[in-house]
Image (tube, rainbow, N blue to C red):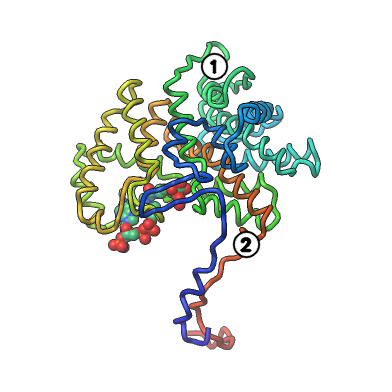
Amino acid sequence: ATGDTTLDVGFANTASCQSAITFIDGDAGILRYRGYPIEQLAENSSFLEVSYLVLFGELPTRDQLDAFSSDIAKHHLLDERMREMFRSLPRKSHPMPVLSAGLNALSTFAYSKWGEGAYDLDRATKVLLGSLPTLAAYGYKNSVGEPFLYPERQLSYIENFLRMSFGLPTHPYPFDDAITRALDVLLILHADHEQNCSTSTVRMVGSSGANIYVSVAAGVSALSGPLHGGANQAVLEMLQGIRAEGGDVTSYVNKVKDRKDTTKLMGFGHRIYKNYDPRAAIVKKHADQILRTHGGNDELLDLALKLEEVALSDSYFQERKLYPNVDFYTGLIYQAMGFPQNMFTVLFALGRLPGWIAHFREQASDPATKINRPRQIYVGETERSYVPMEQRG
Ligand code: SDX
């Protein structure tokens, strides 16, 4: 900088990258994974099938999906010493740093088992997809002081996660197809979202040559922030706060508009979507089904529906193109499934994992897709000379 800080701003907008995984048109509210519309995938596919698509670019044949699922299932079972690691952590820990710690530990166990081969991307892909549900469930079990359960080979990916999270060795787990399918769909909706904060973090860390386990662990940390993945927990806290103060959504909306503090309408707004987030529309439909039929907090759902109605009819939100995003309704469903609020972002991470891995693999295979050092515009002091202590004011 030569004292003139009006540098060409265009210079700052070069930190972008190419990717062939996800297409988003934020103005039109379009989201496609490898060209397939999110609405069709949510309706017809499964999380593991979508994971295969996001990772390898094509929908799998039946044999390819069966082999992929079987390989992943082998990695649901963790090294027994991982249990001791979880048991060593405080029960009141937030599950997101616990999940990140578990992923960093996973890289050490993988390396001790396979040496350099641990970081073979195809192997690591299946180790991560297989291990994350167990790491997530162990984190939850440790927080409630219940015994860890081993995975069962005859169960599906989602069933294993639900049973390891909520099951007990003393009782058979009461599976509920509607809950299992709803979670399958929610994970599909979170599978990828191009260069969001956590995915960019995985790419950034991976671009230094760090292995995929620690890069994904960094992505988990980025996701934990309330402006990103932590928003699904913040939405529930917001709705509970509104209910505690009498359920007057209009006065809450006015408080957001008054901007006297940093109050935001959590679950609203998006960096890219300046239209309804297509995922939010799908989640809203499932929320209505699950909460009306499976109990859960339909009082909070009614509050959320009213809040959406009031906000969408208000010029403050219309002018700023603020619509519900993927986080607005998801927490209501997770709560109805029995998850505590601090587990909601862990569920987001479970869904986003195939996207993180796909971006890591894409960057590793094609330097053109690499982000490794964003540009900056220097706006600090121009050159000046050192001032001895006795001459300072
Ligand atoms: C996710 O990137 C991704 O794809 C993320 C994600 C994914 O799948 O990975 O989609 C997941 O992170 C969804 C977003 C979850 N976060 C929240 O719901 C938190 C609440 N939302 C806001 O923090 C905000 O909307 C952001 C951060 C999500 C997006 O911010 P933008 O689009 O950059 O908007 P901005 O901060 O530049 O604000 C523009 C205007 C401002 O008002 P003015 O100063 O112009 O008068 O809109 C206002 C903001 O104050 N605004 C809000 C608001 N979001 C923006 N006002 C009230 N409530 C909000 N939620």
Query: Badge 1: how crowded within 10 Å, few (<14), some, or many (20+)?
Result: some
In front: label 1 or label 2: 2
Q: Give the residue at the far top of this rendering.
A: 171
Residue at 60%, 65% in the rendered image: 373
As helix, strand or loop, the secondary structure at mark 1 comes to: loop
Q: Position of residue 252 (x, y in %)?
A: 23, 47
Residue 217's tag is none
Is residue 2 in view from this perspective?
A: yes
Q: Residue 76: in sight, yes or no?
A: no
The answer to whether 158 appears left or right of 274 in the picture is right
Q: Nearer the viewer, residue 270 or 18?
A: 18
Q: Secondary structure at mark 2?
A: loop
Residue that badge 1 annotates: 168
Is 186 placed left or right of 248 in the picture? right
Which residue lies at the image location 57% right of the left edge and 36% below the top edge?
A: 59
Separation of residues labelled 1 and 2 (CA atoms):
45 Å
Residue 313: percent from left, percent from top:
20, 48
Q: Position of residue 168 (x, y in %)?
A: 54, 16
Q: Residue at x 62, y 22 (%)?
A: 151
CB under 8 Å between callouts 1 and 2? no
Give the quadrant of residue 127.
top right
Percent position (x, y) of residue 38?
A: 44, 40
